[in-house]
Amino acid sequence: MKLTQLRYLAAIVDSGLNISAAAERLHISQPGVSRQLKLLEDELGFELFVRDGRQLQRLTPAGQRVLEKARRLLREAQSIKAMSLDARDPTKGSLSIATTHTQARYVLPSVIAQFRQRYPQVKLHLQQGTSEQIAELLNDGQVDIAISTGARDKVPHCVLLPCYEWYRRVIVPKAHPLARHKVLSLAKLAQYPIVTYVFNLSGPASLPEAFSKAGLTPDIAITARDADVIKTYVRLGLGVGIVAAMALDPEQDSDLVSFDASQLFPRHLTWVGFRRGAFLRRYVLDFIQLVGPHLDRPTIHKAERSETQLDVDALFTALSLPIHR
């Protein structure tokens, strides 16, 4: 049994049981993947997949157990490789990050500028998506760390560290009727079309829940992943915008009137996460601290040693660290 064969197995599953897609992901030929899969099954003495002709339908129960152990072995191998690289030259390498558009556009530029000054030979790769897409990238090991809000239940085998809390703001053009008000209420907002972020596809969404608890039904006219897109539609008069407070620029958005919505909608907690058991190189630790200054190396190492996310949460509750942005 070879580590390469286990890597091929994981790639097949991650590619939706499509061997051709797995081969493309691995940058090898499709027959090569099929041959190694057969060799692995021959050595194990049982089939890993239920098949319909040549099509893979699903993992067998035994195949599921093998996959779980294979993923652990692959993570350990990756950690050992990272340890070796860190020992040889801690200033060179790569760092892949999955995050939302809002974080990438409004929070990370200053962080990345500082990081690049400190580590000019580390290549950075940013991938943007919804909370659910970010969770999938982190679970599959396609990124080193993730910075997101929500979807905590989608990453059960990861360590999530609290970065900062944030609240929403309501935005309207200066000519909008709401611009004359000093204080907004959910009832006032419910009278107008709303432009806001895409809701998660699973689980409750806090914004419609807030209206629902007040006995109101909001008119969610347009949703988008990008705060800049939301602001564009607000400027066109297509609705009242609800965005993250960090997504507003005092100069670029001076044509809009904004209202603090911290009393209308619940706070949000942005976290930075990594797979449990992963070896974090020194520059990764430094990047995390740049995102959340309270996340120094001793604190991160304590969180790494926690057995569950509940233990991590308890650690930060006990520390009572300031995490406001």
Image (cartoon, rainbow, N blue to C red):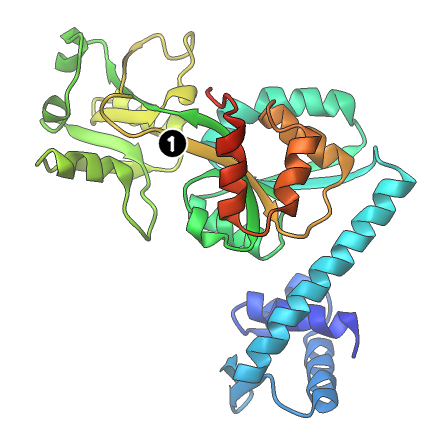
- Position above or below: 275 against 3: above
Instruction: Identify the residue at image location x=37%, y=12%.
Output: 253
* Three-letter code for the amino acid on which mark 1 is drawn: His
Q: Can residue 6 be seen?
A: yes
Dot 1 corresponds to which residue?
268
Between 83 and 96, the residue placed more toward the observer is 83
Q: Can residue 125 be seen?
A: no
Instruction: Give the left or right position of residue 50, taking residue 260 as reference.
Output: right
- Position above or below: 114 against 132: above
Instruction: Identify the residue at image location x=43%, y=13%.
Output: 249
Instruction: Give the left or right position of residue 21, taking residue 57 as reference.
Output: right
Instruction: Farthest residue to the front: give it.
Output: 318
Between 274 and 177, the residue placed more toward the observer is 274
Instruction: Give the left or right position of residue 122, taking residue 12 as reference.
Output: right
Q: Position of residue 110 (x, y in %)?
A: 60, 19
SS state under label 1: strand
Instruction: Please identify the quadrant where the N terminus is shown.
Output: bottom right
Q: Position of residue 212 (x, y in %)?
A: 14, 39
Instruction: Identify the residue at image location x=14%, y=37%.
Output: 213
